């Protein structure tokens, strides 16, 4: 009788463990590891990749993200990939002097806005970073729309640097784009 009770307790314990752990959903977290910048043109009826030049009222800087799978764990019930790191700051600069108050290398954050919305700001890219809603573990691209054209037309290279809460700093420099009037 004692042996039967022991087997019964072991069986109950096994069933309990299986039921507890099989109800949890496995999820992947992703770690943003880099950015890749691209030029876009908003001078026409829709946003499109820019060629070698773009009008000074239509320049858009696209930030694409690269990431790696960080770990598996079971916490998420809404089919999203969880962030393993979150940006805490973003800075946009130019290798060329932009105007009298923005020499080469100074922040241009006040000249860009995150998307075509009213009262948007560059820092909204950081504030809006969230779990992805897709089944691919990379954050969706962000667009920074230039609101103040440079003082002079000509070739420009932009740099974007983002710092993440886990100490990772990512940075990329665009190819040269000719901004024209």
Image: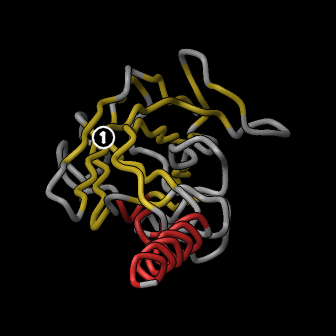
The residue that appears at 41% across and 49% down in the rendered structure is 30
Disc 1 marks which residue?
33
Specify the quadrant of the image occupied by residue 104. Answer: top left
Specify the quadrant of the image occupied by residue 49. Answer: top right
| In this rendering, position of residue 15 left or right of residue 123 | right
| In this rendering, position of residue 92 left or right of residue 134 | left
Residue 8 in the image: x percent, y percent? 51, 78
Q: In this view, does 17 lie above or below 55?
A: below
Specify the quadrant of the image occupied by residue 165. Answer: bottom left
Query: In which quadrant is the C terminus drawn?
Result: top right
Q: Which is nearer the eye, 35 or 56?
A: 35
Task: Assess disc 1: are there few (<14), some (14-19) or many (≥20) residues with their C-alpha within 10 Å of its C-alpha.
Answer: some
The residue that appears at 30% across and 40% down in the rendered structure is 33
Residue 90 in the image: x percent, y percent? 31, 58
The residue that appears at 47% across and 41% down in the rendered structure is 63
Q: Is residue 105 above or below residue 10?
A: above
| In this rendering, position of residue 170 left or right of residue 72 | left
Q: Which is nearer the eye, 108 or 162?
A: 162
Q: Which is nearer the eye, 80 or 138?
A: 80
Residue 146 in the image: x percent, y percent? 51, 51
| In this rendering, position of residue 150 left or right of residue 11 | left
Q: How is the image coloured?
A: secondary structure
What is the count of numbered marks? 1
Residue placed furthest toward the right? 45
Q: In this view, does 159 lie above or below 5?
A: above
The residue that appears at 30% across and 30% down in the rendered structure is 173
Q: Is residue 180 above or below residue 104?
A: above
Q: Which is nearer the eye, 1 or 175?
A: 1
Residue 136 in the image: x percent, y percent? 59, 41
Secondary structure type for disc 1 = strand
């Amino acid at each position: 009788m004692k042996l039967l009770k022991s087997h019964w307790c072991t069986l109950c314990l096994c069933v309990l463990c299986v039921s507890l752990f099989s109800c949890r959903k496995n999820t992947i977290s992703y770690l943003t590891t880099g950015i890749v910048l691209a030029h876009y043109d908003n001078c026409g009826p829709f946003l499109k990749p820019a060629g070698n030049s773009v009008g000074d009222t239509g320049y858009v800087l696209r930030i694409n993200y690269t990431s790696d799978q960080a770990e598996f764990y079971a916490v998420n019930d809404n089919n999203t990939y969880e962030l393993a790191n979150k940006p805490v700051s973003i800075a946009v600069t130019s290798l060329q002097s932009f105007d009298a108050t923005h020499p080469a290398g100074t922040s241009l954050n006040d000249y860009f806005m995150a998307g075509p919305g009213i009262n948007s700001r560059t820092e909204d890219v950081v504030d809006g970073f969230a779990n992805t809603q897709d089944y691919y573990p990379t954050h969706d691209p962000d667009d920074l729309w230039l609101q103040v054209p440079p003082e002079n037309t000509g070739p420009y290279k932009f740099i974007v640097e983002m710092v993440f809460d886990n100490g990772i700093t990512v940075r990329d420099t665009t190819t040269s784009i000719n901004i024209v009037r």
